[in-house]
Image: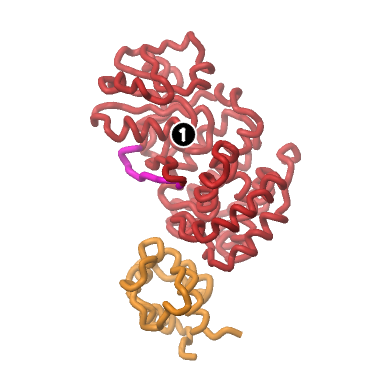
Amino acid sequence: MPGELTLLPWAEVTARAARSATVVWASDRARRALGPEWPTATWLTPDGRDAGAAASASTVIAVGGGALLDHVKLTWRARAPAATTLVAVPTVWGSGAEASPVAVWTADGRKQFRLDPELRPHAIGFDPRFAATVSRDRARAACGDVWAHAIEGFLSPLASDALRARLAALIGRLLELPVAADGRWFEPGAEAAALQARSSVGLVHGLAHVLEPVLAPGVLGHARLCALLLAPVLRWNAATSTTWAELSARFGVDRTGVEATVATLGEVEARRALIPAVEASWRQVLRDPCTRTNSALVRPNSLAGLVAELEAAPVGSPDARP
Amino acid sequence: MMSNRAKLRQLMLDVFLLDEHEFRFDLRRSEIDTWDSLGVVSLAVGIHQTFGYHPTPEEATGLAGVADVIALLEGRGIDLAG
């Protein structure tokens, strides 16, 4: 894990949860998964309407998906006294909210971001048992989110060679994981987000950030959009620029293995269904900050090539992976 | 076959999302709203992709107008005269 992230053993997270000065801010799914025996002194509701109880806490343990973790970061962490501690426990991998200084929310129909080192949680706890609560489809989307962070961070024009070397090593470890609900995704998922935050993301995230509020809320979340878009965008990048070929060779990334794996993240019909929204929102996509740090220059006339990849990029079966 | 000068013009239109009538070869960074810090990154990527030269971060951030881009590229042996 990157040096600034403290990884707590699960026994330590459990011990802290029992302390009177700790409150646990958890999603309903997380609370069910933890069970009644988890020795929590104070629970908060997921929406934080009773967050006043956190004002005097020395530790807040946030347990949930990326949306809940970002909500806690924005509503409590940003205003908490310096001496307090936020422990983030993700119930699904992918967003990296547990490791990132960025918080994301939607307002006025647009994705909004706040980047502030103070938003980064102090410590992370992983309980691999949460993986059992993640459905097959959600797992595939979450894996796509991790892959998108790792690849776009690696290809970013803002990445240093040292950062690329670390992301290349991480990509090698991701290739050993199945695209499935598996507790081994939690730690590399956090690492991908933390490392990517030191460079930038690219067109996959530029598209996802614009499309997510445009599409029916809840129908296609950020992670699923990243999973759907990664393979066609990577193919478009490769057709447009030599960066992916050059950097993968230079840093020893198994390009063929990566391309075969990301092809298993997509679904043909769901991907094609995005095309009208991509076409309608293209001008906005071009102006998105993530698009502007893509590894290949995204031009107004890039739309046709991208649509062709959305139509035709091959899709592999996760079950067929070696 | 597009001349290098025409390629540069198109690159500037695409990177900074300019309309054709907004472009001049004496345009300065201060006249282009989208030539912000992210625009610097996009322009560096575009120069590399279009002309094969990868500006250093110092070179990219030091560009103050289209004339500086021309000077940078001509200093690398890329002819932008015609």
Question: Would you call the spot at circle 1 few (<14 residues within 10 Å), some (14-19), or many (20 or more)?
Answer: some
Which chain comes out red in the rendered image? A
Q: Which residues are magenta?
A: A110-119
Q: Quadrant of the N terminus of chain A?
A: top left
Q: Which residue is most to the top? A: A37
Please say whether residue A150 is visible from this viewpoint: no
Tell me which chain the residue with mark 1 is part of. A
Q: Would you place residue A139 above or below residue B57 in this image?
A: above
Inspect this view and state whether residue A237 appears.
Answer: yes
Q: Which secondary structure, mark 1?
A: helix
Say which amino acid is labelled 1.
Answer: Ala
In this picture, is A250 found above or below B62? Answer: above
Residue B42 in the image, given as x and y percentages of width and height: 45, 65
The residue indicated by pointer 1 is A67
A256 vs A44, left or right, is: right
Chain identifier matching the orange colour in the rendered picture: B
| Residue farthest toward the bottom in the current orientation of the protein | B82
Up/down of A128 relative to A147, above or below: above
Return the x and y of residue A259 as percentages of the image width and height.
66, 51
- Please check the rendered image and state whether residue B8 is part of the magenta-colored stretch, yes or no: no
- The image shows residue A289 at horizontal and vertical percentages of 44, 56
Residue B40: quarter of image: bottom left
The residue sitting at 60% across, 23% down in the picture is A132
Q: Residue at x 63, y 37 (%)?
A: A140
Which quadrant of the rendered structure holds the C terminus of chain A? top right
Q: Residue at x 40, y 68 (%)?
A: B56
- Residue B29: give x, y in percent of width and height: 34, 73
